[in-house]
Image (spheres, helix red, strand yellow):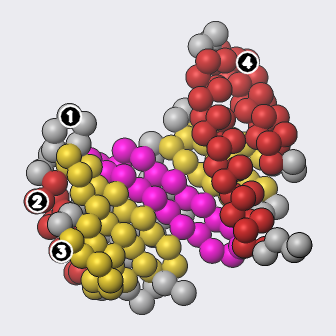
Amino acid sequence: MTVPRTVTRTARIRRLAAAAAAAAVLPVGLAACGGDDADKAAENAAEELIEEAEGGDLDVDIDGDDVTIEGSDGAIQSGTDLPDDFPEDEIPLVGEVTFGNSTATGGTTSWTVTTASDDSPDDAFAAAKEELEGAGFAVDGVESGNYAQLRSDAYRLVLTATEGTGGGAQLSYIVSAAG
């Protein structure tokens, strides 16, 4: 039986994402010992762990809360900042970025960004949707409560707003190419 290439790629991305999560946690424990040597040892240990899980040669860069993993099939950047390659000039965000992820594989890139706002989920969602519509996005599919599928000429986007952990709102932007 032949496994479709997309299934194989999806499985590899899932393994890489799981390894990225491990890479984000492992350095915290190892670096607790302190110093630049401990930080480098943590990064090397994470790289070895991910390479073993993925079965290939990968480059892992851990910079504080941000982890970047690059390999022959693509790259993942994840952390508490907006990903370097996020198209912020085309996709306006409402609130302060608390999480950012960029996944590049097969010639396409997708992003997941979470922001925090002091506004209520309803108000933050309305403000974010208005900003996106002002940037050329329109509802394309389901819109219900604080959930909407939007599309521009270049991107598809899912926007959600929920109650934040400390009050206010947490907004989630899931973005991919419009292709």
Whether 113 is drawn above or below 157: the answer is: above
Extreme residue in the front direction: 1
For numbered disc 4, what is the local secondary structure? helix
Closer to the eye: label 3 or 2: 2
Report whether residue 26 is seen.
Answer: yes
Q: Which residue, given by chain and number where applicable, does mark 2 sit on? A: 123
Whether 14 is drawn above or below 9: the answer is: above
**Which of the two discs, 2 and 1, labels the residue nearer the N terminus?**
2
- Does the CB distance between marks 4 and 1 fall below 8 Å? no
- Does the CB distance between marks 1 and 3 fall below 8 Å? no
Q: CA distance from mark 2 to mark 4?
A: 47 Å
Q: In the image, what residue type sits under mark 4?
A: Asp
Whether 93 is drawn above or below 33: the answer is: below
Whether 119 is drawn above or below 63: the answer is: below
Q: Which residue, given by chain and number where applicable, does mark 4 sit on? A: 37
Residue 153: quarter of image: bottom left
Residue 174: quarter of image: bottom left
Q: Camera-side residue: 4 or 174?
A: 4
For numbered disc 1, what is the local secondary structure? loop
Report whether residue 135 is seen.
Answer: no
Task: Give, as a single range, the part of the protein colored magenta.
Answer: 96-116
**Which of the two discs, 1 and 3, labels the residue nearer the N terminus?**
3
Closer to the eye: label 4 or 1: 1
* Mark 2 neighbour class, 10 Å CA radius: few under 14, some 14 to 19, many 20 or more: some
Q: In the image, what residue type sits under mark 1?
A: Gly
Closer to the eye: label 1 or 3: 1
**Which of the two discs, 3 and 2, labels the residue nearer the N terminus?**
2
- 80 relative to 1 in the view: left or right: left
Q: Which residue, given by chain and number where applicable, does mark 1 sit on? A: 166
Across and down, in percent, residue 23 comes to 66, 35
- Does the CB distance between marks 3 and 2 fall below 8 Å? no
